[in-house]
Image (cartoon, grey):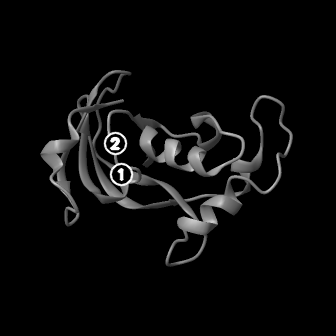
Amino acid sequence: MSVHAVSQASLDELNRRLDVPLPMERFRPNIVVDGWDEPHLEDRARVVTVGTGEFGYAKPAIRCAVTMVDQDTGGKTGPEPLRTLAKYRRAAGGGVAFGVKLSVLRPGELAVGNKVIVTSWETPKTSLEALGPASV
C-alpha cells in the first residue's frame, strides 16, 4: 500500500507559476505537509513518522491527466497543471512528478494537525533545523 504526500510549499510554488491557482484537492494527496518553507522538500524525505504511522520513501508521484479535471464539475480544464509542471518537474524516467509515494512501514493512526517528523533525509541541501516544525 502506498500513501501520496505533498507539501503546501510545493503547491504554493506551482500556483506561483500558474495563471489560475489550483486547490490541493486537484492532486488527491493522502497527507498534506504544512509548515515547510522549501518547495518539494518531500522529495528528500526518506523515513517519515506521522501520528503513530511510519512511512518510507518509495518513488516520486508521477502525475496523470486526472490533474486536469475540475473535481467539482468533472470538466477537463485544459493542459494545466501538467504543462507547467513539465517545465520544472520532469522525472528522469518520464512524466512529471508532484509529491511522493510513501510505503507504509508501520500502520498507525493519523489525524489533521499531527506533527510530521522526518527521521531520515536524502543528502541535505540546507540546515534542516532551520525548517521548523511541520504538521499535516
Quadrant of residue 112 within the rendered picture: top left
**Residue 51 appears left or right of 79:** left
Q: Earlier in the sequence, mark 2 or mark 1?
A: 2
Is residue 67 in view from this perspective? Answer: yes
- Percent coordinates x, y for residue 90 in the rendering: 55, 71
**Residue 127 appears left or right of 29:** left
Near-viewer residue (55 or 78)? 78
Q: Which amino acid does label 1 sit on?
A: Glu
Mark 2 to mark 1: distance in Å?
11 Å
Near-viewer residue (104 or 70)? 70
**Residue located 61% across and 58% down the image:** 63
- Percent coordinates x, y for residue 68 in the rendering: 75, 49
Near-viewer residue (86 or 96)? 86
Q: Mark 2 points at which residue?
A: 37
Label 2 packing within 10 angstroms: few (<14), some (14-19), many (20+): some
Q: In which quarter of the image is the C terminus?
A: top left
- How many numbered callouts? 2
Is residue 7 in view from this perspective? Answer: no
Q: Name the residue under label 1.
A: 42
Proximity of marks 2 and 1: CB atoms separated by less than 8 Å: no
- Percent coordinates x, y for residue 111 in the rendering: 36, 22
Q: Is residue 43 above or below residue 111?
A: below
Near-viewer residue (117 or 106)? 117
Q: Is mark 1 on a helix, strand or loop?
A: helix
The extreme bottom residue here reads: 93
Quadrant of residue 26 within the rendered picture: top right
**Residue located 74% across and 34% down the image:** 71
Q: Is mark 2 on a helix, strand or loop?
A: loop
**Residue located 45% across and 61% down the image:** 60
Q: What residue type is labelled 2?
A: Asp
